Image (spheres, rainbow, N blue to C red):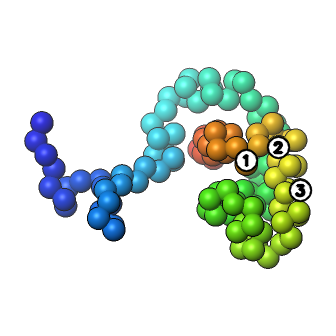
Amino acid sequence: MQAKSYGESNLNFEGGKATKIIELAEITSLMTKSQKEKIFSGCDVKNLAKVFEDPTMMSTVNCFLENGMNVAKTARAMYMHRNTLLYRLNAIRRQTGLDLKDFKMAVTFEILHSLYAIK
């Protein structure tokens, strides 16, 4: 296997560290319809859709994830009290069963949202 030159690679070399940036949409777009249906089969799509289609909830989720799932940073970025943010995150947990403060559940939420968006 021949090595790729710097210009040909999919790597980001900022700060002297090599990092490949992979977009979730890129991965989910490669999935077959049956694979997507299999992932959604164990989910309450109706309640997930309520959150996915609510601009307030999704802006909260996006800001929370962009701020590294840090409650204090997210609350400051959204100009809201941290208890308001926690209330919204708990409302998402009650509605979807996914606690976005848990990394694996946050990733699951993002995968489901990405799949929902390309339906």
Residue 23 higher or lower than 37, as above or below:
below
For the N terminus, give its image quadrant: top left
Residue 26 visible within the image: yes
Amino acid type at mark 3: Tyr
Callouts 3 and 2 close, C-beta under 8 Å: no
Amino acid type at mark 1: Leu
For the residue pair 17 and 10, the one nearer the viewer reads as: 17
Query: Crowdedness of circle 1 by 10 Å Cα count: few (<14), some, many (20+)?
Result: many
* Spot occupied by residue 87 in the image (x, y as percentages of width and height): 89, 56
Comes first in the chain, label 1 or label 2: 2
Amino acid type at mark 2: Arg
- Per the model, the C-alpha gap separating discs 3 and 2 is 10 Å
Query: Taking 93 as reference, is 25 left or right?
Result: left
Residue 112 visible within the image: no
* Spot occupied by residue 49 in the image (x, y as percentages of width and height): 77, 43
Query: Taking 7 as reference, is 16 left or right?
Result: right
| Residue receiving disc 2 | 93
Residue 106 higher or lower than 86, as above or below:
above
Q: Residue at x 72, y 24 (%)?
A: 42
Q: Residue at x 50, y 29 (%)?
A: 32
Q: Quadrant of residue 55?
A: bottom right
Q: Residue at x 69, y 24 (%)?
A: 41
For the C terminus, give its image quadrant: top right
Secondary-structure class at tag 1: loop
Q: Which mark is residue 100?
A: 1
* Spot occupied by residue 99 in the image (x, y as percentages of width and height): 77, 43
Query: Taking 99 as reference, is 116 left or right?
Result: left
Comes first in the chain, label 3 or label 2: 3
| Residue receiving disc 3 | 87
Secondary-structure class at tag 2: helix
Secondary-structure class at tag 3: helix
